Image (spheres, helix red, strand yellow):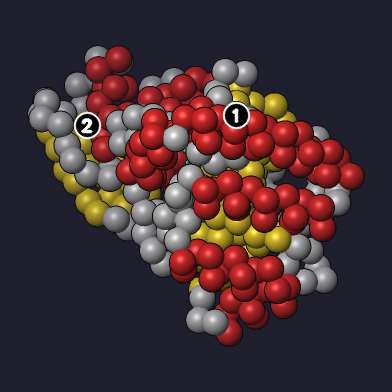
Amino acid sequence: MTSKASSPGKVILFGEHFVVYGIRAILCAIDKRIFVEAEKTNDSSIKIKSEIGEISIDVNDEKLIESPLKPLHYLATKMIQEYDYDGGIKISVKSDIPIGVGLGSSSACCVAGAAAIANLFGKKSRDDILRLAIDAEKTIFQNTSGADCTVCTFGGLMQYDRRGGFSKINSSPNFHLVVANSKISHSTDIIVSNVKKFKENNENEFLELCKKESSLIDKVLGSLNKNNLPELGKYMLENQKYLEQIGVSNQKLQDMIDISKKESFGGKITGAGGGGCIISLTDDTNVSKTMNAFQKNGYECFSVKIDFVGLDNF
Ligand code: MEV
């Protein structure tokens, strides 16, 4: 029996990093997906194959694995133990989400992986899948806010905070996001730890920034309601300043923001920063111009729209 699931990637529109400390973030799923297929086997191994590598581990091997595929190994082991299954599991992953650049490839893999693997043993709800996915993500990123897995599971545009969970934002803004890749890879875990150090060394400044981010989010919700893209673009640039202040930007990312400002409504880092991608807010009038501006300067870019499906095929 084979079980298949797919999950979209995501962008954080506002509030990354601050969301780890309880501030609301606004994020959306994007129309690029990861696909996971899982199959029960008769041998006693967990086999995982993806673009980033391949592993085969005996189900009885208790040694902790050090691999980016660890969340999938965790999920397979958990299900085998929970259901007292005496065979193995074979998992394969295909993705059209660029890896390690802040677009949620890892969270989407946890969500699609949790659904494909768990459904080999019995039907689960989206909430169950989300819980499994967050536990799996914690094997490589202990301090996750849970925001990324949540939007990958439910899709659409949402506000999220650590305590209250998510609520969907029921406007359908007509924007395209131009995603430009700095080609600097980053580790979310390390950058989140660096922000923690910044917070510990600059308690008052960080508190002040949390307040500013929180009131910015209130204004953003108003602009989303009115579908006011020029206003939202201005708020993105404001959010970018806060991210610069906590040290997750760098010269290359700033140069990219300067390119973004020329044609789009505004832009910012999305996700952990330190590298990864810049998003620029556009509509039909300036999406091509913004893409051209990045390409002329040698940056790889593409445009995305909101995915309203979330976890699929399970
Ligand atoms: C990473 O995509 C977003 C961060 O806010 C971390 C998190 O929310 O878990 C940097």
Callout 1 environment at 10 Å: few (<14), some (14 to 19), or many (20+)?
Answer: many
The quadrant of the image that shows the N terminus is top left
Please state the total of marks drawn on the protein image.
2
For discs 1 and 2, the disc positioned in front in the rendered view: 1
Relative depth, front residue between 177 and 123 = 177
**Amino acid type indicated by mark 1:** Ile
Which percent across, then down, holds residue 282? Answer: 74, 63
**Amino acid type indicated by mark 2:** Gly
- Can residue 175 be seen from the camera position used here? yes
Relative depth, front residue between 84 and 111 = 111
Q: Residue at x 58, y 84 (%)?
A: 296
- Quarter of image, res 45: top left
The residue to which callout 1 is attached is 23
**Residue 34 sits above or below residue 124 on the image:** below
Callout 2 environment at 10 Å: few (<14), some (14 to 19), or many (20+)?
Answer: many
Which percent across, then down, holds residue 196? Answer: 39, 34
Q: Residue at x 28, y 45 (%)?
A: 68
Q: Is residue 151 left or right of residue 250?
A: right
Relative depth, front residue between 94 and 258 = 258
User: Is the CB of the residue bearing disc 2 within 8 angstroms of ligand 1?
Assistant: no
**Residue 146 sits above or below residue 245 on the image:** above
